[in-house]
Amino acid sequence: MSTLEIKNLQVSVDTEDGAKEILKGVTLTIKDGETHAIMGPNGSGKSTTAYSIAGHPKYTVTGGEVLLDGENVLEMSVDERARAGLFLAMQYPVEVPGVSMSNFLRTAKTALDGEAPKLRTWVKDVNGALDRMKLDTQFSSRSVNEGFSGGEKKRAEIAQLDLLDPKFAILDEIDSGLDIDALKVVSGGINDYAAREGKGLLLITHYTRILRYVKPDVVHVFVDGRIAESGGPELADELEASGYERFTTGAAV
Ligand code: ADP
Ligand code: MG
Ligand code: MG
């Protein structure tokens, strides 16, 4: 049994005008085997949630905690978070010039496992993961995300997810900028991951489209830095039909 608990998380972001309160107390618990979706209008704090769990320096946690199997993630270094089994795919994946995908992944895998993967099987594994994401194997020698199209970055993130095999994955707008074929490929990779034993998944998305392919167990609607409502997959169907209006009316957005 493994759980990721977000408890009353409050976060401010550093802006030029000082600290701005974004998350006003977010609480949710994901058990292994579960897929949760966070949906919400632009600016509701979805990415802020992902960034603060990732440990991005611009985001200051002012209250609450994030526990992975009871351990406070927020007290860990970024490396320790990864070693504890967290994986985060950001809305805008960063480019890492001069570091090849293959070396980047090998270093990450070595840090996670405590020993370097065997070179022969590793090359095969990397090529297999790229191939499943319909990325040419030459991507392994290209610098991480440098010059990748939006869709290629998203595919590359899922190839990483596949190879690094974390306990919990948080994917922020992994569906943005994907055409329908790419969406199916990426969703297939996410479903393969989620079907593995003991995995938890938090899918952050603005649109319901990906939820036709990746079925959530729980859907949370985010409004103005809070969860306005949680429910089953039917909540996504309702959002698809009626949008966010019912949730945003009266909210100070
Ligand atoms: P979402 O992902 O739901 O669209 P975000 O978490 O990106 O929303 O943003 C929530 C709010 O925080 C927005 O009003 C946004 O402008 C603000 N915000 C987020 N990051 C920053 C930042 N680095 N500087 C200034 N404002 C920010
Ligand atoms: Mg599952
Ligand atoms: Mg966002």
Image (cartoon, rainbow, N blue to C red):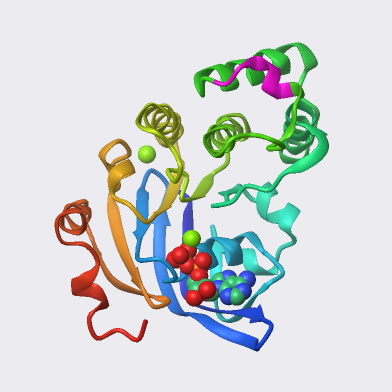
Of the pair 4 and 106, the residue shown nearer to us: 106
Q: Look at 65% across and 88% down and name the residue there.
A: 17
Q: Is residue 140 above or below residue 156?
A: above
Q: Position of residue 111 (x, y in %)?
A: 77, 40
Residue 12 belongs to magenta span = no
Task: Please state the total of marks drawn on the protein image.
Answer: 0
Q: Position of residue 5 (x, y in %)?
A: 47, 64
Q: Look at 63% across and 86% down and name the residue there.
A: 19
Q: Is residue 121 above or below residue 41?
A: above
| Left or right of 114, for residue 55 | left
Magenta stretch?
135-140
The quadrant in which the C terminus is found is bottom left
Would residue 104 be seen by someone viewing this image from the given angle? yes
Q: Position of residue 97 (x, y in %)?
A: 81, 40
When asked about the image quadrant of residue 181, the answer is: top left
| Left or right of 132, for residue 204 | left
| Left or right of 146, for residue 88 | left
Would residue 46 be seen by someone viewing this image from the given angle? no
Please, what is the dominant secondary structure of the magenta stretch? helix
Q: Is residue 106 above or below residue 230?
A: above
Of the pair 80 and 123, the residue shown nearer to us: 123
Of the pair 54 and 75, the residue shown nearer to us: 54
Q: Look at 44% across and 47% down and name the residue there.
A: 201
Q: Position of residue 135 (x, y in %)?
A: 57, 21
